[in-house]
Image (cartoon, coloured by chain):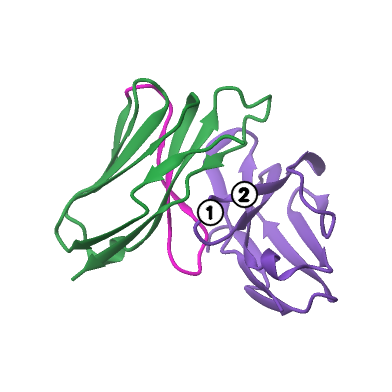
Amino acid sequence: ETGVTQTPRHLVMGMTNKKSLKCEQHLGHNAMYWYKQSAKKPLELMFVYNFKEQTENNSVPSRFSPECPNSSHLFLHLHTLQPEDSALYLCASSRGGDLLGYTFGSGTRLTVV
Amino acid sequence: GQQLNQSPQSMFIQEGEDVSMNCTSSSIFNTWLWYKQDPGEGPVLLIALYKAGELTSNGRLTAQFGITRKDSFLNISASIPSDVGIYFCAGQLENSGGSNYKLTFGKGTLLTVNP
């Protein structure tokens, strides 16, 4: 148990579907992140939230829509995705700039068909 | 964006051998981190380095923060089968633009250990 829980672990969706990824942390962290991990590429930071406010959007297409209702929960809403969006989506959390406590979830393996 | 060049991309070694991997960049970093990712899991922090020249150990793992602040290496001694996984370097840029929790990652080194 890493302290950061992601659901579902696996998701297969069609290009016309709408789905959501969920991330939950009970570590008392104030910052939460979405990363995309594709084969043979570095982890790509997608979004950063600090105390529920979005502080970073790394030019992510609008078909990915994040939501952070509170400091413990983070969602990634997906709609009209493309096959190249298939990847492992990782959530992470931290207490501000405390990099020692920067904790990743196990990820959601997304396949777009 | 900023890039970390991590090498090698993959390694195949025999159990008991020592392993070395490194990350380099043209940019200066304040912090270097080394993570391991097992299949189906998220990265887990192994070692954190905060000062140029710093040498830190965690069991059989040793990592160093390069004196130029542009590189770092990770050594694993006497490898065992459970060392298998992907190892990532990550750094916090000197000029993070106020985002002092933003990390830049390398592409990873896939380690295979043959028993």
Viewer-nearest of discs 2 and 1: 1
- Distance from Cα at disc 2 to Cα at disc 1: 8 Å
Compared to residue B40, the image places residue B33 above or below, namely above
Extreme-left residue of the structure: B16
Chain of the residue where label 2 is placed in the rendered structure: A
Identify by letter the chain in purple: A
Identify by letter the chain in green: B
Residue matched to label 2: A44
- Which amino acid, mark 1? Lys
Q: Residue B61, percent across and down? A: 27, 46
Q: Residue B64, percent across and down? A: 31, 32
Q: Residue B88, percent across and down? A: 43, 49
Give me the residue at 47% from left, 30% from top: B31
Q: Residue B40, percent across and down? A: 50, 69
Chain of the residue where label 1 is placed in the rendered structure: A
Residue at disc 2, secondary structure: strand
Disc tally is: 2
State whether discs 2 and 1 lie on one chain. yes
Residue matched to label 1: A41
Bounds of the magenta segment:
B34-53
* Residue A39 belongs to magenta span: no
**Which of A41 and A57 lies nearest the eye of the viewer?**
A41
Residue B97 visible in rendering:
yes
Q: Residues within 10 Å of mark 2 (few under 14, many from 20)?
A: some
Quadrant assignment for the C terminus of chain B:
bottom left
**Which of A69 and B24 lies nearest the eye of the viewer?**
B24
Give me the residue at 70% from left, 60% from top: A23
